[in-house]
Image (tube, helix red, strand yellow):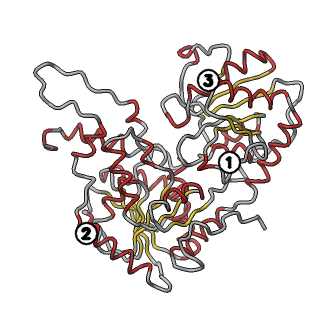
Amino acid sequence: MAGRFSKVRLQHIWRTAKKGPTEVGYAYFRARRRRRNVADDEPLLLESDLLAISGAFDADEQLIERNAALIERYRQQDSFEIRSVLWFLPYFHHVYFGGVHTLLRFAAHFAREHGVENRFHCYDVGAHAVAGMERKVVEAFPALAGSTFTSASNVAPDKLPAADAAIATLWSSVYLMLRVPHVRSRFYFVQDFEPQFYPAGAASALVEETYRLGLPGIVNTPGLADVYGAYGNPAVPFVPAVDLERYHPPAEPRDPDQPVRVFFYGRPTTPRNAFGLGMSALVKVKERFGERVDLVCAGENWGSGAFGLRGRVRNLGVLSSLEEVAQLYRSCDIGLVFMHTKHPSYQPLEFMASRMATVSNVNPATAWLLRDRENCLLAPPLPTMVAARVSELVEDSELRERIAAAGLAEVRQYRWDEQIERVWRAMCLKEGAFTSDAPVNVAAG
């Protein structure tokens, strides 16, 4: 049946699937069925179902049993030496996208601190795209200059060189990793609860099945590690640290006579960030305070006129650099961000590092970081309740300062080197490897 779909159509599916960690799949929420001629007898399949019939995401019992045996052999060892790592790297537009940047940061640390030979298999692009990806990686992480880059178009899975460890970095790469025979261990770099990226159906089922394979998880945040561990998987969590040299408080406090500036991470095309909920809340805040507040958005290009927000909210769109993002954060008093998957995103961490008072939604999976009325304010996902929390911070400068100071103290506890080294020790089966309850809150020295 898959043969009935053109290469162009399947390439479109891949383009949708290769957005990178934390972004892949959201397009499916926006996908619409194509208009057909009456004579067109091709089934009206959703993109989710097209992924299933593509044949790229499948495994038989023998493959799964071999994987289980490999994992068991790995876990039975007293220690495990890692000299080479095979990474399954998804296509990315920008090397500084949160999820991609994080896994490359890990690879660079492994190379720099432990002499690891990193090999990146760019599994969802052709050979023509790999050179550009390699150039961006090396520019951002010089420690990876000696790494090998291959693509799906020029190396088959069973022809990839032997490696001590293979690491899947996105659900779609797991199915490919299972077919790579010459590795001594396999890991799953989990950065969000990816089944939630899709409506219930074929795609979400394919994603969730990767959580039932017993792959040791390198998991971004303790809350997400609890979720991944609930499927019976070993997991080692890490806390994403903030670049405190880039994200830091302003040199001087903002002028108290200026309007209170509220920043909202507003992306209409990304459902997990609840754009409509934020806009509804901010309209209420603007109606209450008028010129006493300055409401600013960034994160995606959109015109305020399209949403009836002209004169109420300023949208700065996609900023040109991380430095510009950091400067914007330092100019704001309050940061509003929603996250309705199991990962808090990096925005609240960056808000806190910039000494912004943070407002977000109640989410049990992010309770390890976001503690209501201690280092942030949390609200149920109701416009009136969200507006009330933002308004409270607008009116009460002492509360705003206390919340901002607590948030700053929170993020200053974490360092990337410490978090990555914990993961490395777990991978090498040292010091209580892969236990979800291992301490992650390492105070700065």
Residue under the point 59% across and 74% down: 113
Q: Mark 3 — residue?
A: 279
Amino acid under disc 1 = Leu
Residue under the point 76% across and 64% down: 444
Query: Residue 403 in the image: x percent, y percent?
Result: 81, 42
Amino acid under disc 3 = Met
Amino acid under disc 2 = Lys
Q: Mark 2 — residue?
A: 159
Of residues 45 and 21, the one drawn nearer to the viewer in this rendering: 45
Question: Distance of mark 3 from mark 1, alpha carbons?
Answer: 22 Å
Q: Which of marks 2 and 1 is in front?
A: 1
Q: In this view, does 6 lie above or below 79?
A: above
Residue under the point 85% across and 24% down: 258
Q: Is residue 247 left or right of residue 191?
A: right
Query: Residue 19 in the image: x percent, y percent?
Result: 42, 44
Of residues 257 and 63, the one drawn nearer to the viewer in this rendering: 63
Question: Distance of mark 2 from mark 3, alpha carbons?
Answer: 51 Å
Q: Which of marks 3 and 1 is in front?
A: 3
Q: In this view, does 71 lie above or below 140?
A: below
* Quadrant of the drawing holding the N terminus: top left
Q: Is mark 2 on a helix, strand or loop?
A: helix
Query: Residue 140 in the image: x percent, y percent?
Result: 55, 55
Q: Give yes or no for contact between labels 2 and 3 (Cβ–Cβ under 8 Å).
A: no
Q: In this view, does 160 lie above or below 283?
A: below
- Mark 2 or mark 3, which has the lower sequence index? 2
Of residues 338 and 242, the one drawn nearer to the viewer in this rendering: 338
Q: Is mark 1 on a helix, strand or loop?
A: helix
Q: What element carries label 3?
A: helix
Q: In this view, does 214 lie above or below 358?
A: below
- Mark 3 or mark 1, which has the lower sequence index? 3
Residue 349, disc: 1
